[in-house]
Image (cartoon, rainbow, N blue to C red):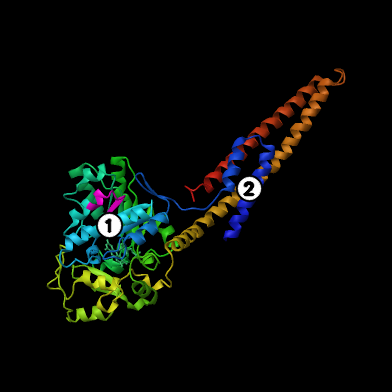
Amino acid sequence: MNMTTLETMLGTLKKVTEDISKTLPFSSIQTFLGDLKQFKPSWPALRIGNLVARTPIVQGGMGVGISLSGLASAVAEAGGIGVIAANGIGLLEKDYFQDGQAAGLRAFRREIRTAREKTKGIIGVNIMVALNDFHQMLDVAIEEKVDIVFMGAGLPIKGLPVERLRKNGVKVAPIVSSSRAVDMIFKMWNKIYHDIPDAVVFEGPKAGGHLGFTEEQLDDPSYQLEAIVPQIITTLASYEKEFSREIPLIAGGGVYSGKDIHDILQLGAKGVQMATRFVATDECDADIRFKQAYVDCKKEEIGLIKSPVGMPGRAIRNQFIIDSEEGRRPSFKCAWKCLASCKAQDANYCISIALNNARKGLLRQGFVFVGENAYRVNKIVPVASLVEELAQGYWLCEKQPVTSRLQTLVSSLKHLEGKYKEIQHQVVVLGKAYEQALTSPSSLVEKAHLTELRNQYNGALSKVRKLQFQITEKLIASYFLLSPKTV
Ligand SMILES: Cc1cc2nc3c(=O)[nH]c(=O)nc-3n(C[C@H](O)[C@H](O)[C@H](O)COP(=O)(O)O)c2cc1C
């Protein structure tokens, strides 16, 4: 079934409804007609408490200057959740090597403010729990009243200013790689804060950057989105019941097309997190050479690295990575131990500096983090076009069942309309006959015949009412089928 077929069906439904509205005395049909004229396919909004993103996409935070105010505000403008990443943001500042921490906090605050000036959409931040200045970054996020804080690379449990977060309307979403982690976080939050986080992000093994899995788990089917998403939904259900609120699950890692989004939402997730696709956009804050590396890379060039922070990471493997694996160290200075788990002195390089070089387009002095599907990217586009492409892809998957259900409804509406006209005609004929019989000289009309006519007339009238009811039912079903909540 293609788009034209659905449009034809909508046209037919409109026509049938118009015809029915001429004979049926219901004002609700007029309202439905009005709604039908405005019908526009859309995808379901992502709701996190009172936060409503009309596009159910969270742009994954990308550290060391890849997702700053430029990308985050563009995604927010397109209806999604734009995210500024805190880690390595200080490298944007000239005085990073004098006071790395101060530089980071300053740049972070500035980027949040710039994003706010550019859009009224939803702006979130990504702060890695493993950062040595995690709490100071979180303070900035609260002071600047960001909409939501995503916390990954560690379990956000102890020492959180939950009361202050709540008072300032800042939502919290931990980023996890298992259902067990969700259970642990929620159990502990409940115990310590008598509260729970507002949403959960599951980042699967196909993601870019640092990965929360061992190398062996990366290709294991039991760690993929399809396996873990239902598990997390089950885990969240008991907390949703206890706290009487919905906790949406957002899933990501390898989500590439509108169809992928559709498949994940079908699994029960309420949104997706995507990063790779957003790198190849005009608004991404990295140098054009960084973005072009996505367009140029081949599948076999995408591989894993052992990051100095002790986790595997996915990147475009280049000479810099090979040199470091073979023990050739570039000279580097650690400005300050930005990541708690970093073994900077044992490492062959500083990952923040390497990633910052790549961000600036100096690809030989660093490397490019990518998701598993980066090789499929073939052009750099504006964020709005990318989101539109994804929406169309999503809608393509949605419309097939909608079209066939609409087809059934329209054909029964047509059938009911035909019957309605027929019976309506009978009512008129019987009505006239009855009237005539009543006004005729009484001797000519037998009493029995009068009763018979009256019964027939009443029978036809009740059939009309039954048909009106059935038609209304079908119209309501069409209305719900086409309402944005359903499609
Ligand atoms: C270039 C790049 C940098 C990333 N940096 C971070 C980061 O700093 N913190 C983080 O939590 N996730 C980071 N990620 C992971 C993304 O936020 C996202 O969850 C993941 O890449 C989604 O998979 P996808 O890229 O296949 O869409 C990064 C991903 C990429 C591609």
Magenta part of the chain: 140-150
Q: Which mark is residue 14?
A: 2
Q: Residue furthest left?
A: 345
- Tag 2: amino acid: Lys
- Tag 1: amino acid: Arg
| In this picture, residue 361 sits left or right of residue 353 | right
Q: Secondary structure at mark 2?
A: helix
Q: Is residue 144 magenta?
A: yes
Residue 5: percent from left, percent from top: 60, 58
| In this picture, residue 425 sits left or right of residue 342 | right
Q: Secondary structure at mark 1?
A: helix
Residue 145: percent from left, percent from top: 28, 48
Q: Quadrant of residue 1?
A: bottom right
Residue 333: percent from left, percent from top: 15, 72
For residue 213, above or below residue 406? below
Looking at marks 1 and 2 on the same chain, the residue that comes earlier in the sequence is marked by 2
Q: Which mark is residue 110?
A: 1
Circle 1: is it few (<14), some (14-19), or many (20+) Cα within 10 Å? some
Q: Quadrant of residue 163?
A: top left
